[in-house]
Image: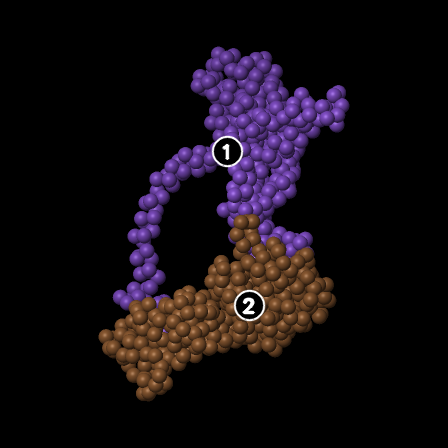
Chain colours: A brown, B purple
Amino acid sequence: MTETTSDAAFVEFRRVQKSYDGETLVVKDLNLAMPKGEFLTMLGPSGSGKTTCLMMLAGFETATHGEILLDGKPINNIPPHKRGIGMVFQNYALFPHMTVAENLSFPLEVRKIGKSEREEKVQRALDMVQMGAFGNRRPAQLSGGQQQRIALARALVFEPELVLMDEPLGALDKQLREHMQFEITRLAHELGITTVYVTHDQTEALTMSDRVAVFDDGRIQQLAPPDQLYEAPENSFVAQFIGENNTLEGVVKSIDGDTCIVTLDDGSEIDAVPINVHQPGERTKVSIRPERVEFNKERLSPDAHTLKAVVREFIYMGDVFRFRMSVAGNDEFIVKTRNAPDAVRLQPGQEIEIGWLARDCRALDA
Amino acid sequence: MTDASHTEGPMLAADGTPLKQSLARSLRRQKLRALLLIAPLLIFVLFSFIVPIGAMLFRSVENSIVQDTLPLTVEALQSWDEKSGELPPENVYEAFVRDMVVAVENKQHTRLGTRLNYEETGMSSLFRKSGRKIKKLDPDTDGPFKDKLIDIHDGWGDVKTWQVIKTHAVPITNGYFLNAVDMRRTPDGPQMQPEDKRILVKLFGRTLFMSLVITGACILLAYPVSYLLATLPMRVSNMLMILVLLPFWTSLLVRTSAWKVMLQQQGVINDTLVWLGLVADDARLIIINNQIGTIIAMTHILLPFMILPMYSVMQTIPPSYTRAAKSMGATNWTTFWRIYFPQSIPGIGAGSILVFILAIGYYITPEIVGGTKGVFISNRIAYHISSSLNWGLAAALGTILLAVVLILYWVYDKIVGIDNVKLG
């Protein structure tokens, strides 16, 4: 990756490896560089190593190999309490025996900040998350969303330059989660803090981040802004993991510059963009987003390859229609169309022809 | 509005009866069933535990023996002024002979003697020795009795004897409780026991003090162990837990006897110290049959009762709290003292109550390793139950012990709050 040795990097992982038992690597050769002020999300299924990376950055786990740099200085041997990194935990970790104000005041107290300044900062931090009137409550008296705000305020009250968040919205219901996603990104940008955010929720990752690092099997599979990640996945794991995706398996027939022809397993041929296939004869998984599939022939280019499809199911979802079809031996092929006035409602059993623009169809590793 | 909540008066159910009544009726069946289910246990506990203990505690004030054995004498003594320093008049002696003839017939007079002997030594032998001779007197023809009785035993010519009988003639007495706090009933009201008989208050004090020391020692020793148990990986902590529980499962007597082997002057500890040259052979440590022995052995025996509640509380403190504190810049010590320790206090509280209450009533261990200086109040209770047979005093001591525990429990609830205690 090109970003790995950027001089302007604020947070940098260099060839970091981590093993807990000396037999398997949880994190394999991690290289990552973040500029100051960036909101970066580590996204991946559980066990992919993302939380371990966060814990290494916070100092609660030591890297087995490699270097972690903060603002150009290696921090491998600096204990967590001297790193000055704010952190929001999955279960908030608000101290139950202290009031909200005492919780916020704690990081300031250990920094030996005077009482009046402390109170002022605590109040400002509480106001920032719209919890100004809750200073005297105990955490147990607050709702989940309120606790979340307090945890956020506590991580920010001592003005750290780097804030780590470990699945902070996991315990909230959908509406509250969406609201808090917005709040967190707003605060992060307003305050100009560098944020590392860990989640397994891809919507969260896409809506909040400047860049997303998709983790799997201890490696970063792709590090890119959300739109690139969704529209131009670099391998089939990312294509599968981010958003809804249709996969068709086949063999590359021919490659011609930035297009190729793939022979699917049932014999039909389609156009695709070769991403990580390099020569004819290679097996490939072709990836196409449900909303990029077209069954209105007029909208397709005349020479485009088309496939036969049988509609299996029609699902009404309000804003979109969702069709499940059988295409080239795949019974789980999904097509989505917007619920526009002229939208066609295909009926189960109907046979149609579908196609797409070659650039929306990506031939990835098998 | 026809909504029920807006009508005046109590809320009504659909059929017009008050809602409360209706609810009670619908729950009655359930309550009855619950009561029926616990009935066997309730009856068992009631008759095998609560009633006997209640009866035992009642003995601490019950004192009808004097009035039952000497009803006429007690009545005659009413008109005698015990503070005058003069012997009671002839009618008292006559009544006494009448009572005694009946009592000796029923063999009750020695029991009365024993009872009064608790208050004044010599009373037992006075009653026993006089009994047979008084029986030969005929109350109707042989009077006057005053001189005859004094002839039989000069104790009857002592004002003190009659004072004791009169002071202890009440059917419900505070005498045992006074005895329990080193006082006694006298004609001039409650007074302190003579200097050489005052031991019980000191013993209560020692029991409380030593229980506190044992509780403190248990806290100090158990805290790090519980911390390890709660933080180490499962495999290691299970191992440690077994080490904690093994002695816990061993018989109390065996453990105490083991300490006897360890602590005596020719025992393992002293031998090792001498062998190491830390202690001279002729200056071996005296660590048994005194307070040190009791404290060492009881601390060890009660330790699991401190570790287990502490552990169960510490286990529930998520590691994310300490992590959060450290991420905010707190040093290890600050994190422990400000974050971890306050959250572990309920465990300390629960363990302390448990250990203290167990310690304050401990009997076997002080009996075996305590010698004379290291015994507790319960050893004294046992002595009065099984050796001196002064059950009244034993009951009074037991009642006081129970009251002390309840008061401490109440104080603890006020200060720490019993809701904060987690026993498991």
**Residue drawn 36% across the image and 81% down it:** A304
To which residue does mark 1 refer? B249
Q: Amino acid at mark 2?
A: Tyr
- Of all chains, the one bearing label 1 is B
What residue would you read off at disc 2?
A197
| In this rendering, position of residue B47 left or right of residue B376 | left
Q: Amino acid at mark 1?
A: Trp
Reply above or below: A305 against A266.
below
Q: Residue at x 59, y 50 (%)?
A: B345
Q: Position of residue A345 (x, y in %)?
A: 28, 81
Name the quadrant of the N terminus of chain B: bottom left
Task: For the residues labelled 2 and 1, say whether their Cβ atoms are less than 8 Å apart.
Answer: no
Closest to the camera, between mark 2 and mark 1, is 2
Instruction: Identify which residue is drawn at 65% across, 23% down.
Output: B267
The quadrant holding residue B79 is top right
Image location of residue B343, percent across then percent down: 58, 53
Tell me if I can see residue A22 in this picture: yes
- Residue A73 location, quadrant: bottom right
